[in-house]
Image (spheres, rainbow, N blue to C red):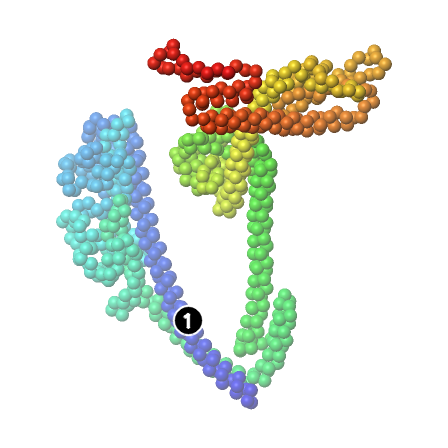
Amino acid sequence: MILTRKLVFPTAILFMALLVGAFVYFWTSLHDVYHEAEEGDLASFRDSFSAEVENQKQLALTLASDVSGNPAIQEAFSARDKQQLLQAALPSYELLKGSNSNIIIYQYHLPDGTLFLNANDPTATEISDAARSPAVILSNAEQKPVSGLEAVNGDLGIRGVVPVYYQGQHIGSVEFGIGLNETLLMSLKEKYGGEWQILLSKDMAFGDNPVEPSPNPDLRVFATTQDSLFFNDAESYSRALQGESTITHPSLNGRDFAFLSAPVYDYSERIIGVLDIVYDHTHISAAQNTRLLAAGLAGLGALILGILGLILLTLRTLQPIQALTRATVDFAEGPESSYANIKAGNDEIGILVDAFNRMTTQLRHSLVDLEQRVTSRTQDLESQTLRLRAAAEIARDSASARDLQELLERSTRLILNRFNFYYTGIFLLDNNKEYAVLVASPTDAGRQMIANGYKLRVGEMGIVGRVSASGEPRIILDARTDAVHFNNPLLPNTQSDMALPLKVENSIIGVLDVQSDRPQSFNEEDVAIMQVMADQLATAIERTRLLNEVERNLKELEGVYGQSTRENWRKLAEGSLAGNKGYRFDNIRIEPINELPELGAEALATGKLISSNGSDQGAEKEKTVAIPIKLRGQTIGVVSLKLKEGYDQNTIATVESAAERLASVMESARLYEEARLRADREQSISRVTTAISGSTEYEQILQTTVREIGNILSDTEVSIQIVDTSDPKQTSQRER
């Protein structure tokens, strides 16, 4: 019994609290649901009103457009012939009036807005400037159709004004107006129920029409379906005049209402008034209260029966609890197949069992959903990884190119093939950064554009021009509707376009342009991946540029060094080596030679190895080989060999290696000799300067100079003369 009391009393209290809470929640939710339903209905009524206005506007505009395109009316209106114009216009207008279309205006206006003909009253004269239709003035001024609501001279109507042309000249406009009055409101009331009324701003000219005031001093009643006027609060009208729709729930004489106030716009989107829709929901509130009372009584009865049943079934409750405990343990071990198959009533245990089963079902569904999301995300990551891998492969393969044009062509071809694009092209900026020049594209259209010298001005033309100026990537998802896209006749199937800047250290050097023949082909992830590849490509382009420049400078430097080497060896050959062409060794002795050996002149001239098999008449066959001695690409000598038949195949390669080292050694010897001669000259000059510096008298300085120079230049006559500039014939001379 103790366990029973512990179960019964707390459970009864809890059940009562839950019942009260459920009742409160049910009452609040039901109240909110009714209100939301009412507000939804009012909003749909408001939209129906807008749709009706829109339909009438299209009708007026269609009628005006049909009339403006009638050749007979155009000709009569152009001639300003009212009788002819009436004959052309009235038959169709009479048919329209007989169709209950509520057309109240059918008029022709001159280009300055002056009334030319009123089909309702052909004898009507020109109206005042203040009463002229702004819609007509706007249509004539801009020469375009104008339609929408308009309040003029106390009348609110739906206008449709279309300019009229004759032989390409604007000759005026035609206006159709459909009345917006109590007739329309009554039709809406019959169709949707409720009460409808329209309030116009007080600055609208009402003429002689009687008006009713409203809680808002800025509004006056224009049309209503109410027998006794009923208004919303002033704040709701103020908010409606500011463009906001409001719904309130006022009560009057013991009845409950839902009240919608929405702004009314004219053809220029200016708020000219407020639309009120009043819905009486007293019967719904009464039905709601009845349901709540029935629910409360039912809940109270359920509470009493539940307590009695709980007392009787407490003992039986323990058995399901044990079974539920076992199911819970099974669920903890493996939720895939756990289910509490227990027959229980509608008490707490039954709720717990049902909740447990729902929980296991939801968890199983959650696991399945989680697995699906993980699978989907994994697929997305795999797809992104594949794109990144393709971008890395493109960057790697492109980086292996050493020539700039080869790099550009290989990169565009790899991008086109790996990503299956419609078109790929690389633009590079010219030296003045004025144009982006297309330099590489693997497509036929791209090659044709390159042949035509295709280029785009930076910052002006197309997506490439914009990106080359801003340095920011840009995509076009639908090239047919995008204003920035440049329609290239050579690429007619382009649907999507993406341009990526090629930047090196924040400096724009070009643009990578890729295009697809499918719309919506690019997203932000594609931009991020392609931009990484574009940055690597820009680095490769700049590196290749620098490498080509270094190679070019190296070739120029080698040319200068080669020329210097050739000149120095020429001077050496003409100087200290003059008359001695080289040496010859015949396996017995070394002797000088004055003439180039066989094949030597040809090897010296061409800088290439020259060989000859000689004569076949001798007892032994010989092979003559001339190997050039090269230094910095310049031939400075030649090594000639006569090889007997059966010589080792590595002999020539060995001699070539020796010739390379010989060139280096000879150059070192030449440089040493130049340094020694330069040092001797400097020493001699220093000795002369020292001897001269030791003398102080004029005659002694001249004698010392002559003597020291004579000692240096043996067997040479040396003389010094000092010329008197005032008498050229007088000289002072010392000789040795």
Question: Residue 345, position in %: x, y?
Answer: 56, 77
The relative height of residue 39 versus residue 331 in the rendered view (above or below) is above
Image: 140 above or below 259: above
Rendered residue at 52%/27% (across/down): 687
Of the pair 597 and 730, the residue shown nearer to us: 730
Q: Position of residue 406 (x, y in %)?
A: 57, 31
> In which quadrant of the rendered view does residue 244 lie?
bottom left
Q: Position of residue 212 (x, y in %)?
A: 17, 56
Residue located 53% across and 41% down the image: 536
Q: Quadrant of the N terminus?
A: bottom right
Q: Residue furthest right?
A: 619
Task: In the displayed orientation, state which residue is furthest to the top.
Answer: 729
> What secondary structure is found at the residue carrying circle 1?
helix
> Which residue does the numbered mark 1 point to in the structure image?
26
Taking the spot 45% from the left edge, 38% from the top edge, the residue there is 508
Residue 421 seen anywhere in this rendered image of the structure: no
At 57% from the left and 74% from the top, the residue drawn is 353
Of 383 and 72, the residue lying toward us: 383
Looking at the rendered structure, the number of numbered marks drawn on it comes to 1
**Amino acid at dot 1:** Phe
Given residues 623 and 383, the one toward you in this image is 623
Q: Is residue 157 left or right of residue 603?
A: left
* In the image, residue 658 above or below residue 384: above
225 vs 680, left or right, is left
